[in-house]
Structure formats: structure tokens, C-alpha cells
Amino acid sequence: SSIQKDNGEETAEEKNLITIGFSQLGAESDWRSANTVSMQSAFVPEEGYNLIYKNGQQKQVNQITAIRTFIQQEVDYIVLAPVTESGWDSVLGEARDAGIPVILVDRRVDVPDKNLYSCWVGSDFELEGRKMAAWIQKYTETIGMKADELHIVNIQGTIGSTAQIGRTRGLANAARENGWDLMAEVTGDFTETKGREVMSGLLKRFDNINVVYCENDNEAIGAIDAIEAAGKKAGPNIKNGEIMVVSFDGVNKEALDYAKEGKISCIAECNPLHGPRVKALVEMLVEGMKPDKFNYVDEKLFSSIDDVTEVEIDGVVYPVQDIGE
Ligand code: AHR
């Protein structure tokens, strides 16, 4: 890389460091903060890297500006955690024209030309949604609820993000197949504040909600506040008027504590520790090797309810990890 400094300090180039421009989409959730720390800890000078981190504040336009800046700085590699899937063709074309390989992390981009990026590593978000739906199905059957007695609301993530698209699809398909009443899908932008606001509105709109599917833990924490503020109880005992909350991530302590207490009934793991995984991909590219295009991370379900110990999807068994006391 030819990152210049004119203050007498050695440049990254002089130190022989590989410069990585990392366009992170934001800092909207605990998951995201853990993901940023994982990247920053993997790409350190002692390991031969100079990481330039840019926070996109959940706006694609900021991420596009960051990528253009990286191109001007002639970084060696660009790592992109894209906020939403569409609208990346031109800027990724510019990176390709500049000869800078792009690695995607976490969410994906929807571009017709798959050669606009080298590879991707992240979660199978639709599978996460399917696993959660399978858990809901199994648990509610165990307690003797009929399918048409489930009245579900979905507090979605950032609309158009891979995590939202997959998790929403996982639930919507299961609702159709099982005959569940999926009453509303409203975005909570993956934040606690919006989760609280949206849930409070939903509780005013519907008096029969018994399952809240939150597309991340931060939304779930906000939604539980709203449930309690409305004088109701978040818990798995839906036959006795509790509202069952389920969510995704399993990163933050508060959410895991809520899961231990049963306020969150089940969490589908979404693993944020991609730093070493992205580093392994960069190392392959440095060596002139061709990594797999799509690299998936294995993930579990977490619950303190011991009625369901596993779910099965397409013949594959996924364990439910007990996180009770
Ligand atoms: O793309 C991963 C999702 O983004 C995580 O589930 C969520 O917490 C984050 O904001």
C-alpha cells in the first residue's frame, strides 16, 4: 500500500504492513460492536496489518464514500460489511478497476456480477430463521397449543439487509406452512430504542399477541421493556397470558441473562467473531490462493427451556444449548 505520512513517521508501506480498509455498516447493536472489536483485534500491526476502520452509521451512502476513500488511499484489500444488499454495483466496479480485492463480511450484496467481490463469510440468516421457527413449532406443540392459537408479531431488522431478509423469510414461510397467525411485520432497525417503540405500538394495535419474534437481541430487550411497561409479562407460559419473546444473536450479557430468566425464550445464535475468519481469507488471497466464494459459520440455538433439546431441518439436527442457571 502507498498510504503516505509526511510527519516523519514510518508509513504502513515502509513497515511492510498490508493495509485493509474496513467499511463497517454501523454500531447499531451489541453484535455489531463485538464484530468491530473482533476485526480490530485480528488486523493489528504485530500480525502485519494496518486496519483503517470506517463506521457507516447505518447509511449506504457513507459506506460508498468510505470505499471511494479506500480506493484513493490505494489500500491493499477492502472488507465490506454492507448495510443492505442492493446498490453496490458501481462502487464495487470502481474497486475492481483499481485492482483492489473486496471481501464481504456478515451481510451480502445483491450484484449480478459475482466477480465484483472475492468471497464472503457470515451466517446463514434464513437457516437461523428456520431454526427459530422450528423451535417455536416444537415448543408450542409440546405445551399443547394449536397452530391457529399462535398470534405472532415480527419486529424486523434493517429492511433490505441480508439478516432481515433471511430471518423474515424463515418465519413467514413457517407461518404459512403451519397456519400461524402472523399479524404484523414492522422494522425495529436492529436497535433497542426502536424495538421498544415498535412493540409499544403493536401492543396498542393488538390485544392478543402471544409470540414476539425479534430479529435481534437489542430489539428484544426494548420489546420486553414495552411489554412490562404495558403491565404484561414476557415469558414462555403463553397458555397463561405471558408473551413469549424469541430473538437472534446471543452476544450481549443482558440478553443471555434474560434468556436464563425465561424473559427471552429462545435465541438463535449469530456469531459476530469474524475477525480471524476474514484474516484467514485475506491470507489465502495474499498467498495467491482462491478461497471458497461463500463461507458459512455453524450456529446453535440457546434456551433455558428444556422441553426442546434439538430441532431438525432438512434432515440436519441442530442442538439447543441449555443456558439455564
Ligand atoms: O447482520 C447481523 C445482524 O446485524 C445482527 O443480528 C444484528 O444484531 C446486527 O445489527
Image: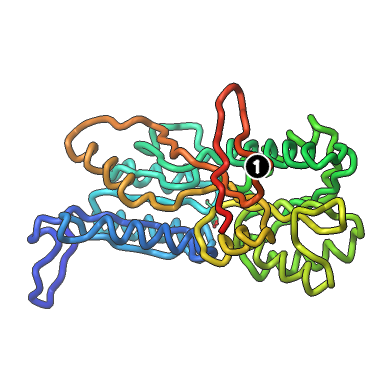
- Is 198 placed left or right of 216 in the picture? right
Residue 21 image offset from top left, x and y in percent: 31, 56
Q: Nearer the viewer, residue 40 or 65?
A: 40
In the picture, the quarter occupied by the C terminus is bottom right
- Is 129 placed left or right of 45 in the picture? right
Residue in the image at 12% along x and 58% along y: 13
Q: Is residue 23 visible to the viewer in this orientation of the structure?
A: yes
Q: Secondary structure at mark 1?
A: helix
* Amino acid type, residue under disc 1 in the picture: Met
Q: Quadrant of residue 223?
A: bottom right
Q: Residue furthest top?
A: 315
Residue 52 image offset from top left, x and y in percent: 29, 62
Write down which quadrant ligand 1 falls in. bottom right
Q: Quadrant of residue 318?
A: top right
Residue 260 image offset from top left, x and y in percent: 60, 59
Residue in the image at 18% along x and 53% along y: 18
Q: Nearer the viewer, residue 304 or 249?
A: 304
- Is 184 placed left or right of 191 in the picture? right
10 Å neighbourhood of mark 1: few (<14), some, or many (≥20)? Answer: many
Q: Residue furthest right?
A: 207
Please determine whether, in this image, residue 7 is positioned above or below residue 105.
below
From the image, tell me which residue sits under label 1. 132
Residue in the image at 80% along x and 42% along y: 143
